[in-house]
Amino acid sequence: MIVNIIQDTGILTAVSTILGILLVIAQRWLSNYGDIKININGKRDIVVKGGDTLLSSLAEKQIYLPSACGGRGTCGACKCKVSEGGGPVLPTERPMLSKAELADDIRLSCQVKVKNEISITIPNDIFNIRKYRSKITEIIDYTYDIKGITFQLLDGDTIEFLAGQYVQLNTKSYGKVRQSVSRAYSVSSGPEHKDHIQLIIRLVPEGICTTWVHNHLKVGDEVEFTGPYGDFYLRDTDADVIFVAGGSGKAPIKSMLEHLQVTGCDRKMTYFFGAKALRDLYLTDEMRAFEKVFPNFKYEPVLSHPEPDDVWDGKKGFIMPYFKDAIRDANNTEAYLCGSPGMINAVTKSLKELGVPEEKIYYDSFG
Amino acid sequence: MGITPFVLFWAAIFTSNILLTNFLGMCSYLSVSKEVESSAGLGIAVTFVLTATAGLNWLVYKYILVPFHIEYLQFIVFIIVIAAFVQLLELIIERYVPALYYSLGIFLPLITVNCAIFGVSLFLVIRNYSFLQSIAFGAGSGIGWLLAILMLAGIRNRLKEKLVPAGLRGAGISLVITGIMALAFIGFSGIQAVQ
């Protein structure tokens, strides 16, 4: 009986192994496209090994296109113009591309494979994006599931960024997770501090990167990140401002406020922070302190589901109904949102109904 | 069974259509049938993979499973063979026929889990087909599946502007249509039924 089981398992294993080996050989043979030239902006040529996606081929040459979802084709951040050699647009790209973008040869670089000579156009400031090495110098528990982590750049390196932009952390393998992923987090410290950045990270159940950050990183660890990315930064106008954040979405707005503290600002600004219960509020004293710094700033935390024993006499329920009082002239109001896609959709809809022009509603969508 | 491969081929398309009489391969049939073009792409890919895996699995069964008396492992082995074949096919098409890859590429992994393909491999064992019969049955089943999904895609295309009751939209009306199509196919069964 046991002999039979062993024999049968052996045959099954042998069949699978042979097929597996066949596939590995086939892959070596068939997916080997040799060295391929990528022409960037008509000026520079780089040579990469073919067969990989454009996004990762470029990253190998230290050119980092933004990619919030890490190459899964769900965030649309890695768009770039592929004028030659990209092949037809794939069904996986279509949902992310508008008609104008399709006509302009814009593609998702995480879906385009480099198989033959290819010509691309990328914005020049992409070249400012690079990899940084850093050491963790501080980890603060803001709430039970949100931590603030400070990364000190190594070797006296400095980073230039706009308040509101984000970086991408590269994880290392830990526990059972072998692969390295990269995930986007907004910088929460002001851009005046060039030798370090702070990120605010909420633990996502089953999240590869957030679990790594929360349960495996400690002070003194070396971490790599790339950046800065994104066009979520405070526009230099005199329009009224509404900030809306939830959870770890506080980060980019904290950075903006710290930056404004240095430059000075008398715009009318209202900051709505949506949380479930009292235990989800953090940095409240710091935000209240900004009310004294700026002549026209108000911090409005709103609790949607306060616990029975929460002592809370502030605003309750959804944040949307409170926008009305914060808007003087909808046409002269800018909104900066950071939070979950669900919150961003709901808030955008409600702001549009109140007359805030769509092009003045700014947010990062981390798909 | 003494049916000639030629008859078996036509029977698999019409009288014993894999989808309309056995209701196999329903998931991709329902989800991909929104557009005629992608339905044709998937249908052609299914036909090709079905024909090839029917032959391959026949050989595997006859020359590996039977001699070693491990027929009871046919489920696992067949699935492994199908998955490996689809993977290989994807690599080959991507390299040598890029145009086809762009239209079929995303459908190929879907095929690995298409139960029509696995079903055909099991049928040819149960019904004790010869190698040629298996190939003919596989090709016929594939073309039958292609025919069914093309018809549904065509009908759904016409339904786009029609008022379908809210509760029936999507999969609901598709299943009703499929049922009527299956009834219509009973009309072919005077020719030769494969049981």
Image (cartoon, grey):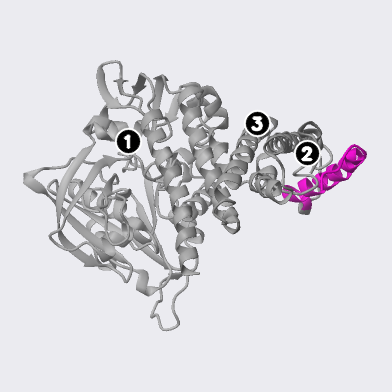
Name the chain under label 3: B
Instruction: Specify the amino acid type for callout 3.
Output: Ile
Tag 1's secondary structure?
A: helix
Q: Is residue B74 visible?
A: yes
Q: Is residue A93 visible?
A: no
Could you say which is closer to the camera, residue A11 or residue A34?
A11
Q: Earlier in the sequence, mark 2 or mark 3?
A: 2
Task: Say which residue appears at 27% left-offset and 66% top-offset.
Answer: A215
Instruction: Specify the amino acid type for callout 2.
Output: Ala
Query: Is-magenta flag for residue B79?
Result: no
Could you say which is closer to the camera, residue B132 or residue B157?
B132
Instruction: Specify the amino acid type for callout 1.
Output: Ser
Q: What range is drawn magenta here? A: B168-195
Q: In this rendering, do the residues under marks 1 and 2 share a single chain?
A: no
Asked if the residue under mark 1 is in contact with the one under mark 3, i.e. CB atoms within 8 Å, the reply is no
Asked if the residue under mark 3 is in contact with the one under mark 2, i.e. CB atoms within 8 Å, the reply is no
Give the image quarter of residue B58: top right
User: Which residue is outermost to the left?
Assistant: A156
Q: Is residue A81 above or below residue A266?
A: above
Q: In this rendering, do the residues under marks 2 and 3 share a single chain?
A: yes
Alpha carbon separation for disc pair 2 and 3: 16 Å
Alpha carbon separation for disc pair 1 and 2: 46 Å
Residue picked out by circle 2: B12
- Horizontal side of B120 relative to A92 (left or right) equals right
Residue picked out by circle 3: B44
Q: Which mark is residue A333?
A: none
Residue picked out by circle 1: A56
How many numbered dots are placed on residues in this image? Answer: 3
Alpha carbon separation for disc pair 3 and 1: 32 Å
Name the chain under label 1: A
* Numbered disc in front, either 2 or 3: 2
